[in-house]
């Protein structure tokens, strides 16, 4: 999973997630029909990965004044993409560190990273941050039959 149930890594006002595909998802299209349709059309492998238990596709909301402490994802078989949806104006105060590098989100842009590296997120603003989080197979993996 994405860690949304692991409150030990979160300090501040909160981190909320809504699962579209993956463990905890509602098995219908009533909750986000347009978004789910677009995801099935444009990133079908990510949807399949989530449905088979290898990741998830979620809306991730980080409240103002919240810190997700340093942690690592469980595997390097996948990458994580964040599509910026609602991004605070002060990008330098809302950012993610992956390894030794700090990055910021931009609305409508993808931020791609390997979450098996240590990462943390800080939202030191008075605004919420919302991204569409998508797990993708690592691009250097090959299918063997």
Image: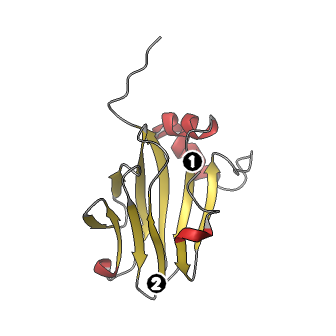
Residue 62: tell me if it is visible.
no
Q: Tell me the quarter of the picture where residue 40 sits.
A: top right
Tag 1, which secondary structure? loop
Q: Residue at x 57, y 34 (%)?
A: 48
Residue extending farthest to the top is 145
Q: Tell me the quarter of the picture where residue 59 sits.
A: bottom right
Q: Where is residue 136 in the image (x, y as percent from the top left)?
A: 44, 41
Q: How is the image coloured?
A: secondary structure
Count of marks overlaid on the render: 2
Q: Residue at x 47, y 63 (%)?
A: 131
Q: Position of residue 99 (x, y in %)?
A: 30, 59
Q: Which mark is residue 127?
A: 2
Instruction: Say which of 134 and 8 sits in front.
Output: 8
Q: Which of marks 1 and 2 is nearer the N terminus?
A: 1
Q: Residue 84, relative to residue 49: is it above or below?
A: below
In the rendered structure, the answer to whether residue 53 lies left or right of residue 77 reads: right
Q: Residue 56 carries which label?
A: 1
Q: Residue 46, relative to residue 14: is it above or below?
A: above
Local packing at callout 1 (Cα closer than 10 Å; few below 14, some 14-19, many 20+) is many
Tag 2, which secondary structure? loop
Residue extending farthest to the bottom is 126
Residue extending farthest to the left is 101
């Amino acid at each position: 999973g994405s860690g949304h149930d692991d409150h030990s890594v979160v300090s501040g006002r909160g981190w909320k997630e809504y699962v579209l595909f993956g463990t905890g998802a509602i098995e219908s299209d009533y909750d986000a029909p347009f978004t789910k349709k677009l995801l099935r059309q444009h990133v079908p492998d990510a949807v399949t990965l989530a449905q088979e238990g290898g990741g998830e596709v979620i809306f991730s909301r980080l409240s103002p004044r919240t810190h997700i402490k340093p942690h690592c994802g469980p595997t390097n078989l996948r990458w994580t993409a964040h599509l910026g949806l609602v991004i605070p104006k002060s990008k330098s105060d809302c950012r993610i560190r992956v390894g030794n590098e700090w990055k910021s989100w931009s609305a409508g842009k993808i931020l791609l990273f390997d979450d098996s590296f240590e990462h943390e997120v800080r939202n030191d603003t008075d605004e919420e941050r919302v991204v569409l989080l998508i797990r993708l197979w690592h691009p250097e993996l090959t299918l063997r039959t």
